[in-house]
Image: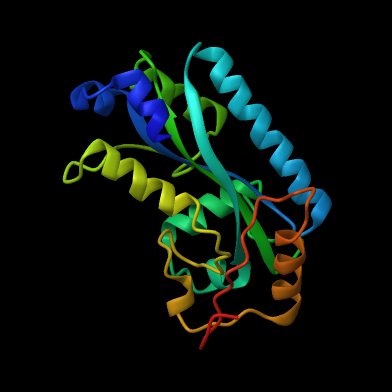
Amino acid sequence: MLSVHRKLHGTDELKARKSIYFVTILNELCLLDHGEVEAALERGRKALASLRRSFDGLLTYGRFELEAMDMQVIFRDRPCKKKAVVLKGLNGGSEDTPERVMGLFHLHSLVFLNGHDAESVRRKLTTMFPGSYRVQMRPLYDELSVEQSIDNLCRYFLKSKVAYNYTMKTNGDSIGRSFDSKTLTDLVVLGMSNEVGVIGCNVYSKSSVV
């Protein structure tokens, strides 16, 4: 991604900052099941392809992730109101889910606008993924250089961990609830699947990294 940046922008930091955005999309809620995750991945890929077709020359570089969500905790305890709103919307407006633990399938990506207008791309994404809090499109860090920003963001979405999370932040492991054995097994099996291949396997539990 650094090489793409250098090719498109050279040493022009202002041009780069107008072009490069960090995008997070909350795609869908799915069962921790190989077929479900594979289907979600296919839909995610098609959505990105559709976005690129709508904006010729736009580039996307990122990674899909799967985050285990305890839906009972989300809807009963409401540790994060935003996440409850998002997940209810992704579940068709209902708080009743097929399983207590579901997978939040989502994307973290760097987007190179390559001459396109940021607001036009944002509007397209919110049309493709309607609902509160599903799309975030943020500029690079002000306090870091462009190349430092790219490096930091790449580290973030290539972190290769599985999170059992309840908030919009990545602190689910600090809340004090552990994986149950079925969830842990499902995530490990999915993470080792060559066919899906979108999930790392650095699994956080209550007291240690398993």
> Hey, which residue is sitting farthest left in the picture?
143
Count how many numbered circles sit on residues in the image. 0
The reply to whether residue 179 is in sight is yes
Picture layout, residue 157 above or below residue 110: below
Q: Is residue 9 left or right of residue 187?
A: left
Q: Is residue 196 left or right of residue 71?
A: right
Pick whichever, 113 or 135, lies toward us.
113
Image x and y of residue 173, in percent: 48, 76
The reply to whether residue 119 is in sight is no
Q: Quadrant of residue 75?
A: bottom right
Pick whichever, 50 or 159, lies toward us.
159
Image x and y of residue 193, in percent: 78, 56
Q: Is residue 40 left or right of residue 124?
A: right
Quadrant location of the N terminus? top left
Q: Residue at x 39, y 17 (%)?
A: 114
For the rendered model, the colour scheme is rainbow
Pick whichever, 29 or 17, lies toward us.
17
Quadrant location of the C terminus? bottom right
Picture layout, residue 92 above or below residue 188: above
Image x and y of residue 172, in percent: 47, 71
Q: Residue at x 68, y 81 (%)?
A: 180
Pick whichever, 148 or 157, lies toward us.
148
Picture layout, residue 149 above or below residue 85: above
Image x and y of residue 7, in percent: 37, 21
> Hey, which residue is sitting farthest bottom in the picture?
207
Picture layout, residue 40 above or below residue 96: above
Q: Residue at x 77, y 65 (%)?
A: 189
